[in-house]
Amino acid sequence: MAQTDGAADIDRTFMALALEEAEAAAARGEVPVGAVLVDGSGAVLARAGNRVEADADPTAHAEVLVIRAAGAARGRPRLPDTTLYVTLEPCVLCVGAIAFARVGRLVFGADDPKGGAVVHGPQFFTQPTCHHRPAVVGGIAAERSAELLRAFFRARR
Amino acid sequence: MAQTDGAADIDRTFMALALEEAEAAAARGEVPVGAVLVDGSGAVLARAGNRVEADADPTAHAEVLVIRAAGAARGRPRLPDTTLYVTLEPCVLCVGAIAFARVGRLVFGADDPKGGAVVHGPQFFTQPTCHHRPAVVGGIAAERSAELLRAFFRARR
């Protein structure tokens, strides 16, 4: 997971946008997770926060929403030139979406021991039934991402 | 997985609808998988076949489409009273959608050793990071489902 300083700066910049989406999701009463999908030239293709409750859609996770939006905009379901930034380790639904979309690179924030599927649980990208493995970088802006989630669940208890 | 004969007859009836959706998907050039979502009274809430290519949406698997449609129609993302019929063992994306939607019962057709996530690969419903486990019945109309898939991929080779 070693990166040059320049690449790490770029990752932190896009993760800051994903964190804005997570904050906006929290303000709507959604679990605060945000995502940004960026193409190879650094253009933002889509950004979104969770909309499970707003859309009454159990699949409306931030990662799925940006992948759907970019696929629809391009008219193609596969997005191999893209990097997905997401504030939390993707769950089982989202690792599936990432693999099927052929996302080239995944950058995530906080680990999710309870529901993550990249470095926890099924660790899907290591499974023989996974047919596309993105490059993966974790731990970018992890503390801010985790704090948003802690504050959200603290307020609901 | 033992069932009464009456329940098995009902399962075969709904699976026949799911197979119709799979056949329609094949006719559109999509991987032939179909799904039907049924409520506790036996009413069909939604039916769909794969629409990945038609919608340029890598998440437009039949299972995801019926869950999204039913959530939107009811205005609720959780569907605990439902049974999902699908012609093929669900993949990692779809087991996530099923768990998040709190689908009560899953009935599938053919096993999918290459991409399945119920009895193959991550076997997600057995993972500690899975927070909802439906009742599962497999092998209903499995031969017809598998033949549709074989014919589809044979024609593309």
Image: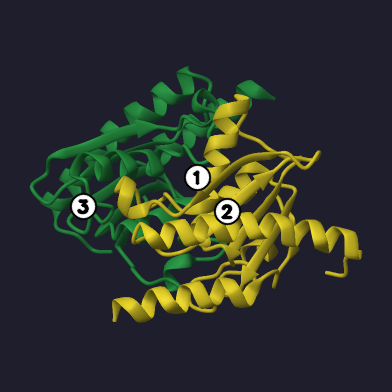
Chain colours: A yellow, B green
Gap between marks 2 and 3, in whole Å?
Answer: 30 Å
Asked where in the image residue B95 lies, by quadrant, the reply is bottom left
Chain bearing tag 2 is A
Asked where in the image residue A71 lies, by quadrant, the reply is top right
**B6 or B14, nearer to the observer:** B14
Q: Is residue B36 among what the camera can see?
A: yes
Q: Residues within 10 Å of mark 2 (few under 14, many from 20)?
A: many
Residue beneath label 1, please?
Answer: A65
Chain bearing tag 3 is B
For mark 1, give the secondary structure: helix
Residue B2, image x, y percentages = 23, 63
Gap between marks 1 and 2, in whole Å?
Answer: 8 Å
The residue located at (57%, 61%) in the rendering is A19
Is disc 2 in contact with disc 3, using a CB cutoff of under 8 Å? no
Q: Residues within 10 Å of mark 3 (few under 14, many from 20)?
A: many
Residue beneath label 3, please?
Answer: B82
Closer to us: mark 2 or mark 3? Answer: 2
Mark 1 vs mark 3: tell me if same chain: no
Type of the residue with mark 1:
Leu
Q: Decide which of tag 1 and tag 2 comes sooner along the chain.
A: 2
Q: Is residue B114 among what the camera can see?
A: no
Residue beneath label 2, please?
Answer: A35
Q: Name the quarter where the N terminus of chain A is drawn.
A: bottom right
